[in-house]
Image (tube, coloured by chain):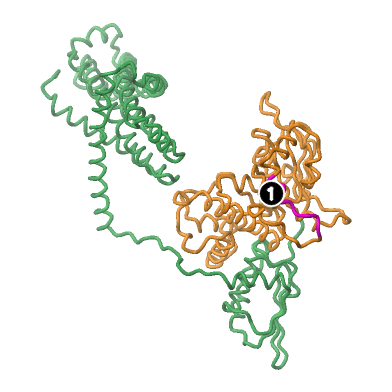
Amino acid sequence: MSATIERDTPREAIIEVRNLVKRYGDNVVHNDLCLDVYRGEVLSIVGGSGSGKTVLLRQIVGLERPTSGSIRVFGENPADLTAAQLQALRNRWGLQFQRGALFSALSVIDNIALPLREMRALPDNLICQASLLKLQLVGLSAKDADKMPADLSGGMIKRVALARALALEPELVFLDEPTAGLDPMASDDYVALIRELRRELGLTVVMITHDLDTLVALSDRVAVLADHKVLAAAPIQEVIKVDHPFIREYFLGDRAQRALQALPAPTGPGSAPPYPGEA
Amino acid sequence: MERQPTPVIEISRQDEAFRVLLQGEWTALALAGCHEARGLRAQLHELTEAPRHAQWSLDGITRLDHIGAQLIWQAWNGRMPENVSLNDGQRRVFDRIARMRSEGWKKRMVERFNPVTVIGANLLSFFAQLAVGITMLGQLTFDLLRFLRAPQRGPWREISANIYNVGYKALGITALVGFLIGIVLSYLSANQLRIFGASTFIVNILGMAIIRELGPVLAAILIAGRSGSAITAQIGVMRVTEELDAMSVMGISHGFRLIMPRVIALAIAMPLLVAWTDLLALAGGMVAARLQLDISYVFFLRELPDAVPVANLWLGLGKGVVFGMLIALTACHFGLRIKPDTQSLGQGTTASVVTSITVVIIADAFFAILFKDVGL
């Protein structure tokens, strides 16, 4: 997949994180962290537990403020914007939370319809149709529409959460551990789904994941978070060449080696990598 | 933020030819952001009447998302027109919409209010809850027996933590409310008593009312609102986060570890809070009596034991024990009934507080009847 990105043209960075510092009391999470995300790519963020992956994501979407440093999304610094501008910016991204964060009092379809209803501009029958379409886009059917979040399985929660994140068809989606807790088959389905959506909707995806198979199958670039910064942000073939204890441990173990065998051979564009499960 | 190019419809009629040109950005955001959205939808609605041979051109569309496409799809009456020019990406979007199945789902309507079914449902729910409540009381008895048989293995830490939370932390609010009620009661009675020249009876009125009735009920209502709701919410959130299930799996009994410690804690803390509320309410009454009726503190305190037989104090404290247990049981009962969603949490907490206050007042009425010959 990395081959499909044209290296000649300068790529447009839609997220620019510069010299980010985040501290909780004495606990330093990020120190002088820099990261770029380019339009149209899938960037995976990996790192050990507690290395601040989720905190980084929360800072990018403005749920938490950095201690210092700057974050620009679509060229705007969320801190400088007025409320209306910030809302316009928020409509351009979607976030799938780690545990779904579905509204437990609303049914599946109402959860998906919520961002659309909040715009208060679209007629309700269109909203219902659009929500049903999103539901089917993520592989669920209309008969799941009236279920309550408490009645859903883990995989379905992830799918509904993704459908909600995609409700406004944003340019940028953030996925926090999208395949954690899914069985290998469901997680392969999910990978295929993201790949398809990305092709259809031209998404830019920033994904936190622990799952090496997903990582290998989807990422154009991998950003490795360790020692409070981004150690490397590059295609996975280049990342594994970096000499660092964490990278060695993470990518060069037995498990990782098995997953890495699924890497696409560097052929021409359009050749989809095989499913990791089949490798 | 760059301005979104708004969606535009151009219609041209020449003799027989009917052409529709769609231009601009047909996305949810653009549709929501443009001021003419309503007019645009009306225009599209009219186009559902367009002749079959109409020529549609989507080449001018810069961005098309599923929501914009669905809007156009509605104008097409749910099928591709014969003459349409669009690119591959757009065709894929429309194909996906065409494949969408909405069978098996229809918009759910809110159920109409029907007084008969509502009364019936409430009645059934009342008896069901009563049955559950009685079961819980039975379970509590077994748990208490188990505790008495092996006290060293009891949940001492939970009991102590609960006493601190429901008792010690409630001292401030019960003191404030008790003191103010004492002042109010004293002020109101003082005027009446002065008319009859029976000022010294203020001691009897305040002592009897506060120690026998007001102290226990006031403390119970405050604790029901303060700690009852907290207990319900706490247990309810444990349901939401599956902690209750985790306890069951580990073989930790809900009754022994959640309900019993709270019942015991409230049974211990409530009489102490009642005594504390009595004390502060009497102090408030004493201050007001001094200001209104010129009754000295010394006189007040000396008269009090004669005016109020000591049985009333024991009765008040006994009420405290019973009220405390009732509040804890009601709160736990509603906490365990909460389903894992936010709405149920809110309803459960409300129901818990309302019910425990009602139960306390009913119990108080029973006390009044049972002990009508004691201490009067």
Q: Residue furthest bottom?
A: B15
Give the residue displayed 75% in from the left and 48% down from the top: A73
Percent coordinates x, y for residue A31 in the rendering: 76, 31
Q: Residue furthest right?
A: A8
SS of the residue under disc 1: helix
Percent coordinates x, y for residue B217 in the rendering: 27, 27
- The region drawn magenta spans A258-267
User: Which chain wears orange?
Assistant: A
Percent coordinates x, y for residue B154 in the rendering: 34, 20
Q: Nearer the viewer, residue B265 or A263?
A: A263
Q: Residue flagged by tag 1: what amino acid is it?
A: Leu
In the picture of the structure, the residue carrying the numbered disc 1 is A86
State the image quarter where residue A163 is shown: bottom right
Q: Colour of chain B?
A: green
Q: Main secondary structure of the magenta part?
A: loop
Percent coordinates x, y for residue A49 in the rendering: 64, 34
Pick the quarter of the image with the C terminus of chain B.
top left
A260 is within the stretch colored magenta: yes
- The answer to whether residue A12 is visible is yes
Q: Residues within 10 Å of mark 1 (few under 14, many from 20)?
A: some
A60 is within the stretch colored magenta: no
Q: Nearer the viewer, residue B175 or B295?
A: B175
> Relative to B155, does residue B19 appear above or below in the rendering?
below
State the image quarter where residue A78 is shown: top right
- Looking at the image, residue A148 sits to the left or right of residue B252; the answer is right
Pick the quarter of the image with the N terminus of chain B.
bottom right
Chain ID, mark 1: A
